[in-house]
Image (tube, rainbow, N blue to C red):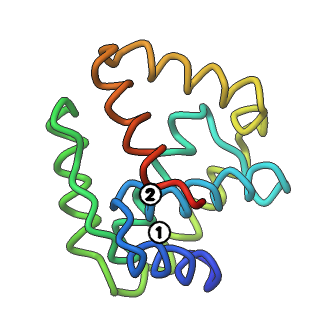
Amino acid sequence: MPEKETIERAKQDKREGKAPSTQAGEFVHEEIEHIREGKHGARSTKQAIAIGLSKARRAGVDLPPPQNASEETKEQAKRDERRAGKKPSQRRSRATSKALKREGHSAASKEALSRQARAAAKKRSAASRSRSAKKAAKTRKK
Protein backbone atom coordinates (compact mmCIF):
# COMPACT_ATOMS: atom_id res chain seq x y z
CA MET A 1 0.00 0.00 0.00
CA PRO A 2 1.28 3.48 -0.87
CA GLU A 3 1.87 5.97 1.93
CA LYS A 4 -0.86 8.54 2.67
CA GLU A 5 1.44 11.45 1.80
CA THR A 6 2.10 9.95 -1.64
CA ILE A 7 -1.62 9.57 -2.38
CA GLU A 8 -2.19 13.14 -1.15
CA ARG A 9 0.60 14.50 -3.40
CA ALA A 10 -0.88 12.64 -6.39
CA LYS A 11 -4.36 14.06 -5.60
CA GLN A 12 -2.82 17.54 -5.35
CA ASP A 13 -1.26 17.04 -8.81
CA LYS A 14 -4.67 15.99 -10.15
CA ARG A 15 -6.34 19.08 -8.65
CA GLU A 16 -3.68 21.24 -10.31
CA GLY A 17 -4.60 19.63 -13.64
CA LYS A 18 -1.31 17.83 -14.14
CA ALA A 19 -0.97 14.82 -16.45
CA PRO A 20 -1.60 11.27 -15.15
CA SER A 21 2.09 10.47 -15.72
CA THR A 22 3.01 13.31 -13.34
CA GLN A 23 0.58 11.97 -10.74
CA ALA A 24 2.06 8.48 -11.17
CA GLY A 25 5.54 9.96 -10.79
CA GLU A 26 4.81 10.46 -7.08
CA PHE A 27 4.41 6.68 -6.66
CA VAL A 28 7.58 5.97 -8.66
CA HIS A 29 9.45 8.47 -6.47
CA GLU A 30 8.13 6.70 -3.35
CA GLU A 31 9.32 3.35 -4.71
CA ILE A 32 12.81 4.70 -5.40
CA GLU A 33 12.91 6.09 -1.84
CA HIS A 34 11.88 2.69 -0.43
CA ILE A 35 14.75 0.99 -2.25
CA ARG A 36 17.21 3.68 -1.14
CA GLU A 37 16.24 3.45 2.52
CA GLY A 38 16.53 -0.34 2.42
CA LYS A 39 12.86 -1.31 2.77
CA HIS A 40 13.34 -3.66 -0.18
CA GLY A 41 15.32 -3.95 -3.41
CA ALA A 42 14.68 -4.29 -7.13
CA ARG A 43 16.31 -6.28 -9.88
CA SER A 44 16.53 -3.24 -12.16
CA THR A 45 15.53 0.40 -12.39
CA LYS A 46 12.85 -0.61 -14.89
CA GLN A 47 11.33 -2.94 -12.28
CA ALA A 48 11.31 -0.17 -9.66
CA ILE A 49 9.49 2.13 -12.09
CA ALA A 50 7.03 -0.63 -13.04
CA ILE A 51 6.19 -1.24 -9.36
CA GLY A 52 5.56 2.48 -8.87
CA LEU A 53 3.29 2.68 -11.93
CA SER A 54 1.40 -0.41 -10.80
CA LYS A 55 0.84 1.16 -7.37
CA ALA A 56 -0.37 4.35 -9.06
CA ARG A 57 -2.94 2.45 -11.13
CA ARG A 58 -4.12 0.56 -8.05
CA ALA A 59 -4.45 3.86 -6.17
CA GLY A 60 -6.79 5.14 -8.89
CA VAL A 61 -4.53 7.24 -11.14
CA ASP A 62 -6.03 7.13 -14.65
CA LEU A 63 -2.82 5.96 -16.33
CA PRO A 64 -3.23 4.03 -19.60
CA PRO A 65 -0.67 1.38 -20.60
CA PRO A 66 1.89 2.58 -23.17
CA GLN A 67 0.90 1.93 -26.80
CA ASN A 68 4.17 0.16 -27.62
CA ALA A 69 3.96 -2.15 -24.58
CA SER A 70 3.73 -5.95 -24.87
CA GLU A 71 0.36 -7.69 -24.55
CA GLU A 72 1.35 -8.97 -21.08
CA THR A 73 2.12 -5.45 -19.87
CA LYS A 74 -1.18 -4.13 -21.24
CA GLU A 75 -3.07 -6.98 -19.54
CA GLN A 76 -1.31 -6.26 -16.24
CA ALA A 77 -2.16 -2.56 -16.51
CA LYS A 78 -5.85 -3.45 -17.03
CA ARG A 79 -5.68 -5.78 -14.03
CA ASP A 80 -4.15 -3.01 -11.91
CA GLU A 81 -6.89 -0.58 -12.96
CA ARG A 82 -9.56 -3.12 -11.98
CA ARG A 83 -7.90 -3.51 -8.56
CA ALA A 84 -8.13 0.26 -7.93
CA GLY A 85 -9.60 0.96 -4.50
CA LYS A 86 -9.52 -2.69 -3.41
CA LYS A 87 -7.36 -3.99 -0.58
CA PRO A 88 -4.36 -6.06 -1.73
CA SER A 89 -4.25 -9.77 -0.95
CA GLN A 90 -2.24 -10.20 2.26
CA ARG A 91 -0.61 -13.47 1.18
CA ARG A 92 0.41 -12.17 -2.25
CA SER A 93 1.64 -8.89 -0.77
CA ARG A 94 3.82 -10.72 1.75
CA ALA A 95 5.26 -13.01 -0.95
CA THR A 96 6.11 -10.00 -3.15
CA SER A 97 7.76 -8.15 -0.28
CA LYS A 98 9.79 -11.22 0.63
CA ALA A 99 11.00 -11.65 -2.96
CA LEU A 100 11.92 -7.95 -3.29
CA LYS A 101 13.87 -8.05 -0.03
CA ARG A 102 16.26 -10.54 -1.64
CA GLU A 103 17.07 -8.10 -4.47
CA GLY A 104 19.83 -5.50 -4.53
CA HIS A 105 19.60 -1.76 -3.93
CA SER A 106 21.74 -0.44 -6.78
CA ALA A 107 18.65 -0.09 -9.01
CA ALA A 108 17.84 3.19 -7.23
CA SER A 109 21.33 4.67 -7.42
CA LYS A 110 21.77 8.01 -9.18
CA GLU A 111 23.89 6.32 -11.86
CA ALA A 112 21.25 3.66 -12.56
CA LEU A 113 18.44 6.23 -12.74
CA SER A 114 20.54 8.42 -15.04
CA ARG A 115 21.29 5.44 -17.30
CA GLN A 116 17.57 4.57 -17.44
CA ALA A 117 16.55 8.17 -18.23
CA ARG A 118 19.13 8.46 -21.01
CA ALA A 119 18.10 5.13 -22.55
CA ALA A 120 14.41 6.15 -22.44
CA ALA A 121 15.17 9.55 -23.99
CA LYS A 122 17.23 7.97 -26.79
CA LYS A 123 14.17 5.97 -27.90
CA ARG A 124 12.15 9.17 -28.41
CA SER A 125 12.33 11.43 -31.45
CA ALA A 126 13.81 14.93 -31.25
CA ALA A 127 10.35 16.40 -31.95
CA SER A 128 8.82 14.41 -29.09
CA ARG A 129 11.52 15.54 -26.66
CA SER A 130 11.16 19.12 -27.79
CA ARG A 131 7.36 19.01 -27.40
CA SER A 132 7.55 17.73 -23.83
CA ALA A 133 10.27 20.27 -22.93
CA LYS A 134 8.05 23.12 -24.19
CA LYS A 135 5.09 21.73 -22.24
CA ALA A 136 7.25 21.46 -19.09
CA ALA A 137 8.40 25.05 -19.51
CA LYS A 138 4.80 26.19 -19.92
CA THR A 139 3.53 24.38 -16.82
CA ARG A 140 6.55 25.17 -14.61
CA LYS A 141 5.81 27.18 -11.47
CA LYS A 142 6.90 30.78 -11.86
Tell me where residue 18 sits by quadrant: bottom left
Tell me where residue 128 sits by quadrant: top left
Q: Quadrant of the C terminus?
A: bottom right
- Across and down, in percent, residue 12 comes to 49, 80
Q: Secondary structure at mark 1?
A: helix
Please name whichever residue, 71 or 19, is drawn nearer the observer in this view of the structure.
19
Please name whichever residue, 128 or 56, is drawn nearer the observer in this view of the structure.
128
Q: Amino acid at mark 1?
A: Arg
- The answer to which of marks 1 and 2 sits earlier in the sequence is 2
- Across and down, in percent, residue 19 comes to 34, 59
The label shown at residue 92 is: 1
User: What residue is drawn where x is 42% and y is 66%?
Assistant: 56
Q: Name the side, left or right, on which 141 lies relative to 81.
A: right
Q: Which residue is mark 2?
A: 22
Sort mark 1 into few (<14), some (14-19) or many (20+) by Cα contacts within 10 Å. Answer: few
Please, is residue 58 above or below residue 79 in the view? Answer: below
Q: Amino acid at mark 2?
A: Thr
- Across and down, in percent, residue 75 comes to 17, 50
Q: Secondary structure at mark 2?
A: helix
State the separation of the CA atoms marked 1 and 2: 28 Å
Please, is residue 71 above or below residue 142 in the view? Answer: above
Q: Quadrant of the N terminus?
A: bottom right
